[in-house]
C-alpha cells in the first residue's frame, strides 16, 4: 500500500529546478492497478523513484505499508565491479531472502547461470536489463510493484514470460505503472491518472488525456519559439 499526501516534487539537481508535482494526494491499495500517463521529460522516472522509496519528495509525505518494489528494470543497485553472484547475494540481504533462493530465481528467469562469475560491467545491455527485471520480480508478494515505462524486456518469447510472471505476482499485489504509452496502460491498469502541468489528474478516458498532453507539449514548444 502507498499513500501520498500533499506531495511536492521537483526535478533533481541544484540549478534550474522545475516543479514535477505540486500538492499531489492519492492512495494505492492492495489489488489496485493504477496507470499514470505522462509525457517524456515530465518527471515520471523521478516520481517512480520517490514512490518506491529510492528518493524522497521535496514536500509532503509518502507512506508505504508492506513491500514496495523499486522500479521494475531499475539497475542502479547492481554494482558494475561486482560479479553477478556477488550482486545477487547483496540483493538477498537487502530483501531478507536467502542468496540461494534469489540466485536460483534470477538465473532460471534470465538463463544466465553460466555468467554468475562475470562482473556486471561485462554483461551486454540486454543481459543487464533482463537481470535487473528478474531482481525486481524475485521480491515475494504480496507487494506493490512500480513500473516506469518498462513492463517486460527481451525477445518476444521472453516478454511473454515477463508478462506471465508479473501477472502472477499481481494476483496478491498492486501495480503503479507510469508510461507515455496509453495502449500499454490500458492492458495492465483499471484506474488512471494523467501527469500534466504539475498535477496528477484522475481520468476515465486515456485517449482524451493523451490529446491533452500533446496540446500541452505543442503549447510549450510554441512558447519556446516565441521566446527565442
Image (cartoon, helix red, strand yellow):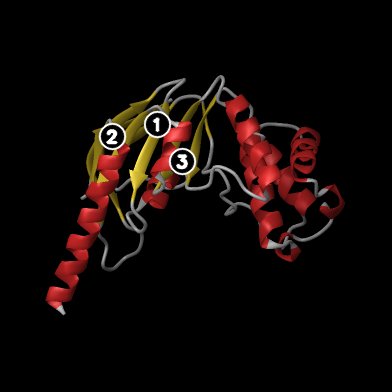
**Residue marked by disc 3:** 184
Please report whichever mark, 2 or 3, sits nearer to the chain's N-terminal start: 3
Label 1–label 2 contact, CB within 8 A: no
The answer to whether 138 is drawn above or below residue 132 in the figure is above
Residue farthest toward the right in the current orientation of the protein: 114
Could you tell me residue 133's position as x and y percent? 63, 45
Residue bearing mark 1: 34
- Residue extending furthest toward the bottom: 228
From the viewer's side, name the closer residue of 123 and 96: 123
Assign a secondary structure to mark 2: loop
Q: Nearer the viewer, residue 108 or 57?
A: 108
Q: Which residue is mark 2?
A: 205
- Measure how far apart labels 1 and 2 are at the Cα level: 14 Å
The quarter of the image holding the N terminus is top left
Q: Between marks 1 and 3, how big is the CA–CA gap?
A: 12 Å
Whether residue 209 is visible to the viewer of this picture, yes or no, is: yes
- Inter-mark Cα distance, 2 to 3: 14 Å
Q: How dense is the environment of label 3, judged by Cα within 10 Å: few (below 14), some, or many (20 and up)?
A: some
Q: Residue at x 32, y 54 (%)?
A: 42
Q: Secondary structure at mark 3?
A: helix
Q: Is residue 118 left or right of residue 69?
A: right
Secondary structure under the numbered disc 1 in the rendered image: strand
Q: Position of residue 84 (x, y in %)?
A: 76, 52
Image vertical order of residue 52 relative to residue 2, above or below: below
Earlier along the polypeptide chain: callout 1 or callout 2? 1
Label 1 CA crowd tier, 10 Å (few <14, some 14–19, many 20+): many
- Quarter holding the C terminus is bottom left
Q: Position of residue 141 (x, y in %)?
A: 60, 24
Amino acid at each position: 500500500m502507498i499513500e501520498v499526501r500533499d506531495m511536492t516534487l521537483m526535478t533533481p539537481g541544484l540549478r534550474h529546478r522545475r516543479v514535477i508535482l505540486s500538492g499531489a494526494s492519492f492512495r494505492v491499495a492492495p489489488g489496485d492497478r493504477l496507470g499514470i500517463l505522462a509525457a517524456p521529460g515530465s518527471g515520471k522516472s523521478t516520481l517512480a523513484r520517490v514512490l518506491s522509496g529510492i528518493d524522497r519528495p521535496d514536500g509532503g509525505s509518502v507512506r508505504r505499508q508492506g513491500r514496495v518494489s523499486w522500479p521494475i528494470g531499475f539497475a542502479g543497485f547492481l554494482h558494475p565491479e561486482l560479479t553477478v553472484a556477488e550482486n545477487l547475494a547483496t540483493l538477498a540481504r537487502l530483501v531478507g531472502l536467502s542468496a540461494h533462493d534469489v540466485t536460483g530465481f534470477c538465473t532460471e528467469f534470465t538463463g544466465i547461470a553460466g555468467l554468475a562469475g562475470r562482473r556486471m560491467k561485462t554483461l551486454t545491455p540486454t543481459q543487464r536489463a533482463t537481470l535487473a527485471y528478474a531482481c525486481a520480480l524475485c521480491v515475494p508478494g504480496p507487494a506493490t510493484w512500480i513500473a516506469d515505462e518498462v513492463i517486460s524486456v527481451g525477445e518476444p518469447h521472453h516478454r511473454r514470460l515477463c508478462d506471465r510472471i508479473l501477472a502472477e505476482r499481481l494476483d496478491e499485489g498492486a501495480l503503479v505503472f507510469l508510461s507515455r504509452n496509453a495502449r500499454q496502460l490500458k492492458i495492465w491498469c483499471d484506474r488512471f491518472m494523467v501527469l500534466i502541468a504539475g498535477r496528477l489528474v484522475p481520468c476515465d478516458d486515456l485517449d482524451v488525456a493523451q490529446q491533452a498532453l500533446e496540446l500541452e507539449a505543442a503549447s510549450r514548444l510554441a512558447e519556446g519559439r516565441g521566446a527565442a
